[in-house]
């Protein structure tokens, strides 16, 4: 278990319920600055619930979430974004009827109203995603699936996150585009952004991440360095097709 004393984010004995259904049970994880941490598990294991709770969209029934030691789970979502936690949700959830540029501008709503800083952030996104620069005047709904995923990530980067929550970034994408998206994830991390990654492709997630957690039925079943999890017989059997 990693030392949590200087963790960027700590989830401490967290439980979350949808009515009578307990989606998370006594979940504890921690994320250190500069890491990519993967969350893997079957459908319904609680991965998306955990991300939604970290970003303030759900409230825990028990336990706590701490950001650099301070309580996070009591704050509304817009405050959490301002603290540096940005969430790219499953299914992208871009604004299909707005242009690429307008989608990106909306991602900067939590930042001070400094037009030059916003434009500089947008140019950084365009440098990372040249195809978005080419498509900047198109409606987002006309983009391909991979381009929409790039836009969703770019929109989150406009908020200058310290921690980026990525929920199923490869969902519905062709293998070539998946490889491109994961290289982008590595590049974002190399530039200093910490990442918590939920991903159905367990092999891709664990070969990208530094550490991982395996969620099953709402609780942490296994955790450890990614290389260790890749060699674990139970992980191989359940998630890696081996």
Image (cartoon, helix red, strand yellow):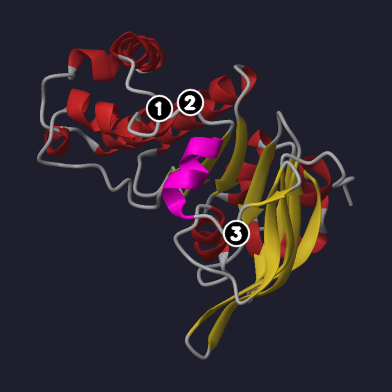
In this orientation, does residue 236 appear? no
Please tell me which of labels 1 and 3 falls first in the chain: 3
Q: Residues within 10 Å of mark 1 (few under 14, many from 20)?
A: some
In the image, which disc is placed on residue 224? none
Residue behind mark 1? 111
Q: Secondary structure at mark 2?
A: loop
Q: Residue at x 63, y 21 (%)?
A: 192
Please tell me which of labels 1 and 2 falls first in the chain: 1
Q: Residue at x 49, y 24 (%)?
A: 184
Q: Is residue 126 above or below residue 158?
A: above
Q: Is residue 185 left or right of residue 121?
A: right
Please tell me which of labels 2 and 3 falls first in the chain: 3
Residue behind mark 3? 73
Residue behind mark 2? 160
Residue 239 drawn in magenta: no
Q: How far is mark 1 from mark 3, CA to CA?
A: 21 Å
Image quadrant for the C terminus? bottom right
- What span is colored magenta in the figure? 76-85
- Say which of 131 and 14 sits in front: 14
Q: Is residue 224 left or right of residue 131?
A: right
Q: Is residue 31 left or right of residue 185?
A: right
Q: Is residue 132 above or below residue 215?
A: above
- Say which of 113 and 146 sits in front: 113
**Foreground disc of the pair 1, 2:** 1
In this orientation, does residue 61 appear? yes
């Amino acid at each position: 278990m990693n030392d949590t004393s200087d963790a960027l984010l700590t989830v401490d004995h967290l439980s979350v319920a949808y009515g009578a259904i307990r989606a998370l049970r006594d979940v504890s994880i921690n994320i250190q600055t500069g890491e990519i941490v993967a969350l893997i598990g079957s459908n319904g294991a609680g991965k998306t619930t955990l991300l939604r709770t970290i970003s303030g969209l759900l409230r825990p029934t028990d336990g706590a979430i701490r950001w650099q030691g301070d309580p996070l789970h009591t704050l509304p979502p817009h405050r959490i974004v301002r603290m540096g936690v940005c969430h790219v949700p499953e299914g992208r959830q871009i604004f299909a009827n707005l242009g690429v540029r307008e989608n990106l501008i909306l991602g900067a709503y939590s930042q001070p109203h400094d037009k030059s800083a916003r434009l500089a952030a947008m140019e950084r996104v365009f440098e990372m995603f040249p195809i978005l620069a080419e498509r900047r005047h198109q409606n987002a709904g006309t983009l391909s699936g991979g381009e929409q995923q790039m836009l969703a990530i770019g929109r989150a980067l406009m908020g200058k996150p310290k921690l980026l929550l990525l929920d199923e970034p490869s969902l519905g994408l062709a293998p070539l585009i998946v490889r491109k998206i994961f290289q982008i994830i590595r590049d974002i991390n190399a530039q200093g952004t910490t990442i918590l990654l939920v991903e159905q492709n367990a092999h891709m997630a664990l070969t990208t991440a530094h550490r991982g957690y395996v969620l099953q039925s709402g609780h942490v079943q296994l955790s450890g360095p990614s290389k260790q999890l890749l060699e674990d017989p139970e992980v191989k059997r359940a998630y890696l097709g081996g």
